[in-house]
Image: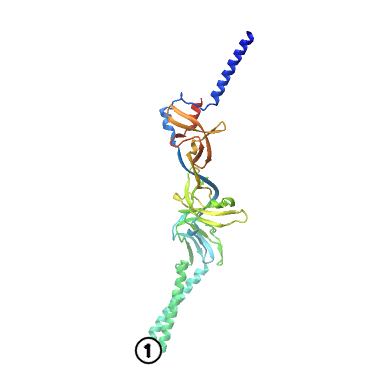
Amino acid sequence: MKNSLYIVILATACTWLTSCEKKTDAPVDSKAFMLSDTMMHRIKLDTVITEPVRNELTLVGKVVPDENQVIKIFPLVGGNVEEVDVELGDNVKKGQKLAVIRSGEVADFEREMIQAQSDLLIAKKNLTSTEDLYESQLVPERDVITARQMVDKAQAEVSRVKEIFSIYGLGKSTNYVVKSPINGFIIDKNVNRGMQLRSDNTESLFTVGQIADVWVMANVNESDIPRIKLGMPAEVRTISFPDEVFKGKVDKIYNVLDPETRAMRIRIQLQNVGFRLKPEMHATVSLNFAEDIKMQAVPSQAIIFDRSKNWVLVFTSPSKIEARSVDVYRTVTNRAYISAGLKDGERVISRNQLLVYNAINE
């Protein structure tokens, strides 16, 4: 009898333990859970929809100014740098003074101008005198023709020197003023006050660039080249603005590979609103492209990884929320594609879902 009693007790205990294990492994049931009105305002619901599966290619690049809107300023004369009025990064306007160079070459141009104007004045007076003598029949006509040729020659010399003054932007002083040819920012500066410049200097003094539009140059691995298409939408993120996405498109594919990196470069054009993107900034580029299959999709934020599985919270009502295991096919920046576990039209929680998940598991 005692042995029979022990067997009955042992069987009951095993049944109870087995029952507990089944309850633990069963999907989370939230029948006893009720979402409060406050929490309802803190969550976000998204509807499950079927859409083409998108893939994402992540590239590393850097921000550079638009080369078509960058101008290097070279010294047209040699001399001593008297003034430098701007610094690296300054915003300048077209025609703004950047530096002043005191130059002997400018003094020579000024001397040439004075000489040319003087020669023209003498030639005109000689022509007038010769014409008076010709009217009095004291000189032949050929002297008048010669005098007019001398006036034309002197006038041409004055025009030549004036053109030099116009090209160099010279005034009446011996100083050469370096001016900005466009509106933009000083993105490179290679001159300081007191510097001596040679007339054959090949290094630019300043580089002025407009950065209202910028480029992002990115490297593409050889294996990813077939995926790149002209006009592909691109999303650019930077360390300086981690929560902001700058949107552009691939507008240039350089169809050559760097022999050292074995990578191909592409160019993404961006509008630089507020000049937040600075040249030489590091950037992460995300290129999205569609595949030939469709699946249910939800925001990637809705996915919860727990107990070696992926879960989503399926919302039916505040008192009926199911933690459901799903098979994730792929996750991109803001979308997760589900191969099994969801149906079109179901609603999932995509904000503060972890708080709700922990609450229904308590």
- Give the residue type at disc 1: Tyr
Vertical comparison of 123 with 98: above or below: below
Residue extending furthest toward the right? 3
Quarter occupied by the N terminus: top right
Vertical comparison of 32 with 45: above or below: above
Q: Indicate the position of residue 31 as horizontal and vertical percent values.
A: 46, 24
Along the viewing direction, whichever of 197 and 209 lies nearer the viewer: 209
Q: Secondary structure at mark 1?
A: helix
Mark 1 nearby-residue class (10 Å; few <14, some 14–19, many ≥20): some
Along the viewing direction, whichever of 335 and 161 lies nearer the viewer: 335
Residue at 62 percent across and 13 percent down: it is 7
Count of marks placed on residues: 1
Vertical comparison of 34 with 92: above or below: above
Residue at 53 percent across and 41 percent down: it is 330
Along the viewing direction, whichever of 208 and 229 lies nearer the viewer: 229
Residue extending furthest toward the top? 1
Give the residue number, with chain letter if any, for mark 1. Answer: 134
Please indicate, yes or no, whether residue 87 appears anywhere in the rendered image.
no
